[in-house]
Amino acid sequence: MLERYEGGESAILVHVDFTSDHEREDLEELKLLTDSAGVTTCTVLTGSRSSAQSKFFIGTGKVDELASLVQMYDADVVIFNHSLRPSQERNLERVIHCRVLDRTGLILDIFAQRARTHEGKLQVELAQLRHLSTRLVGSRAELGRQKGGIGLRGPGEMQLETDRRLLRERIKYIQKRLEKVSSQREQSRRSRKRNELPTVSLVGYTNAGKSTLFNRLTDANVYAADQLFATLDPTLRKLELPDAGTVILADTVGFIRHLPHDLIAAFKATLQETRDADLLLHVVDCADEQMRENIDEVNSVLEQIEADDVPVLMVFNKIDKLDNPSCRVELDEEGKPRAVWLSAQEALGIDELLDVLNQLLAGVLVEHRLTLPASASKLRSRLYAMKGVISESFGEQGEFVVDIRLRQADWQRLLKQEDEPLERFISDRLLGKVTFINQKDGETNGLE
């Protein structure tokens, strides 16, 4: 649809240091994004401005300097560390005779490379088409022409109108496909809710170590690398905890500063897993100098997708890069865990994290001693399947004496589903109801 300059492997980066904090971007992050896209950086052109210039974004003097650098290095693409208007891209390309890409276009290109599943490819294509829809005007000279003469008369559309119509039709088609995907995900979520399986979603700034932690917790083989947006397609795995039982752990795409709105809209179905989670693990690179800014940016995106009211456990990762690494669990004033310091790469603090997850997700537990006759073998098998049996022994008459620990919700469901009342099997109530939520200094508070 678009005939533009051929993209290549060598790029010139352009970074402008604005006085306003809202418009300021990180140059080191741009270099990481460029490396993640597989592009070689020739040089970096920097400058300072109070505000962007309307025609070229940068001043005319910098435009001439940029054109000279393009000729000197024979660059294939110029990448701006900022969002450009379509007119600014076109004006720059006419002067420097090189393809111009802004920060949003670069992120979209990385996403296009990382997409592996059918759903991920559809989401990226939708975001790309929305981004390109504003950049059709003047992208080639014949967009405003109409053919004339015998055999050349068309339906009365200009080339620009034809491209826009095809673009709209493709966007509608992709949206319908993604609606179907969203419906399928919603059915899966309803099924998990019926089975009362809690969901834990990993969120955080890109390259914070979410996939490495995901692999460490679930023994999965999800692709993990020291680069931005290594994970794009969401992955769900089961995690077995002693008291909480089966938990669904979801690895999601990382966030970044000024994440394009088209991407947020396109990945709505994927981000729904985050909004409907029972607990968010906010993974943070504690060795990053901009740790606080990254946390604020993730919280901003969570607010945009309406997931800011989901309970959050902070996970400060990569402590092995600190001078004095120390695995620890931070508690709030109520004795509830609020943060875990660990290293997923070196497997430090993983047991502490699992213990905290078990505490937060188990909630109220019920412990009983059941005396089961031989005829209740089906119930005994079910208790084992629910991983609720603590210990088992045999009575004098050959009956099964089973000590169980179940979540209160699982116990109540078991009471409703069994044909005969289970209370008659209870021979000794051990602790009644126990909660691990208020655990502090290793002491467990029991509730009778």
Image (cartoon, rainbow, N blue to C red):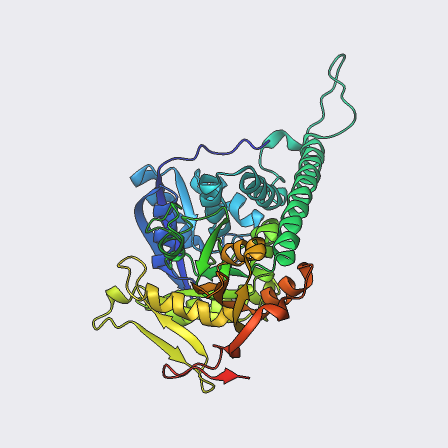
Image quarter in which the N terminus is found: top right
* Depicted 24 relative to depicted 6: above or below: below
148 horizontally vs 288: left or right: right
Q: Position of residue 104 (x, y in %)?
A: 50, 51
Which residue in the rendered view is the most extreme toward the left? 323
Q: Is residue 127 left or right of residue 354?
A: right
* Relative height, residue 378 to residue 50 (above, below): above
Query: From the viewer's perspective, is residue 116 above or below residue 187?
Result: above
Residue name at image x 52 percent, y 46 percent: 89
Residue 370: percent from left, percent from top: 53, 68
Picture quadrant where residue 448 is located: bottom right
Residue 28 visible in the picture = yes
Count of marks placed on residues = 0
Q: Quarter-wise, where is residue 423 in the image?
A: bottom right
Compared to residue 334, the image places residue 185 above or below, namely above
* Nearer-the-camera pick, 261 or 358: 358
Q: Which residue is rendered at x = 59% and y = 64% of the image?
A: 410
